[in-house]
């Protein structure tokens, strides 16, 4: 092979863009999917924090009892996940109410490619002091 032909092959850029795209596009897809996944995770967590706070406050002022807290919270959770709501207090004469809402990571993580989330729950718990006379 002559030197002139080797220089000509080096200058020939046909197909270089295709190879670069083949290397970069999967990485970009992964980055955008990760942004979407963590965005959904934070949005679901934010909704759970708001609902657990609202449920505990409503129980603390005596508008609902712990037996009604599940239906109250489920009506306010906006994402289609399987939530578990646990509420204690406001029926046994205690001074505090505690509300816990959890959802399995397997449902929250719609793109769990590398098994990052694994088993477990996304959970939020809040304990609030009862208003005077409402938990007696």
Image: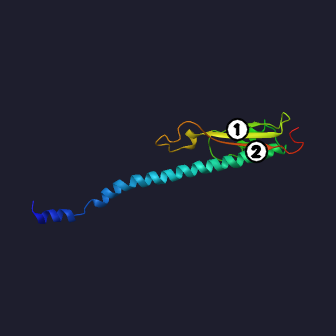
- The quadrant of the picture occupied by the C terminus is top right
Nearer the N terminus, badge 1 or badge 2?
2
Residue denoted by label 1: 85
Q: Out of 108 and 133, give the one closest to the viewer.
A: 133
Instruction: Please report the residue visible at 66 percent of the width from the left and 49 percent of the height from the top.
Output: 47
Q: Residues within 10 Å of mark 1 (few under 14, many from 20)?
A: many
Q: Nearer the viewer, residue 24 or 132?
A: 132
Q: Position of residue 127 (x, y in %)?
A: 75, 42
> Are dots 1 and 2 in contact, CB under 8 Å?
yes
Q: Quadrant of residue 2?
A: bottom left
Q: Residue at x 55, y 39 (%)?
A: 106
**Left or right: 34 as drawn, with respect to 100:** left
The total number of labels drawn is 2
Mark 2 neighbour density, 10 Å: few (under 14) some (14–19) many (20 or more): many
Q: Return the residue found at the far right.
A: 133
Say which residue appears at 53% left-offset and 49% top-offset: 37
Left or right of 49: which side holds 38? left
Dot 1: element: strand
Residue 129: image location, x then y, percent:
81, 44
**At which x and y percent is residue 120?**
58, 37
- Circle on res. 55: 2
């Amino acid at each position: 092979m002559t030197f002139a032909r080797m220089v000509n092959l080096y200058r020939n850029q046909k197909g270089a863009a295709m190879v670069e795209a083949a290397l970069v596009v999967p990485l970009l897809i992964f980055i955008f999917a990760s942004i979407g996944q963590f965005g959904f995770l934070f949005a679901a967590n934010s909704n759970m924090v708001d609902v657990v706070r609202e449920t505990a406050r409503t129980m603390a002022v005596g508008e609902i009892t712990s037996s009604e807290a599940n239906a109250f919270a489920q009506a306010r959770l906006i994402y289609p996940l399987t939530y578990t709501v646990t509420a204690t207090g406001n029926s046994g004469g205690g001074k505090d109410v505690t509300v816990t809402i959890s959802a399995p990571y397997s449902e929250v993580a719609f793109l769990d490619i590398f098994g990052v989330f694994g088993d477990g729950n996304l959970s939020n718990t809040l304990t609030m002091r009862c208003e005077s006379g409402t938990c007696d």
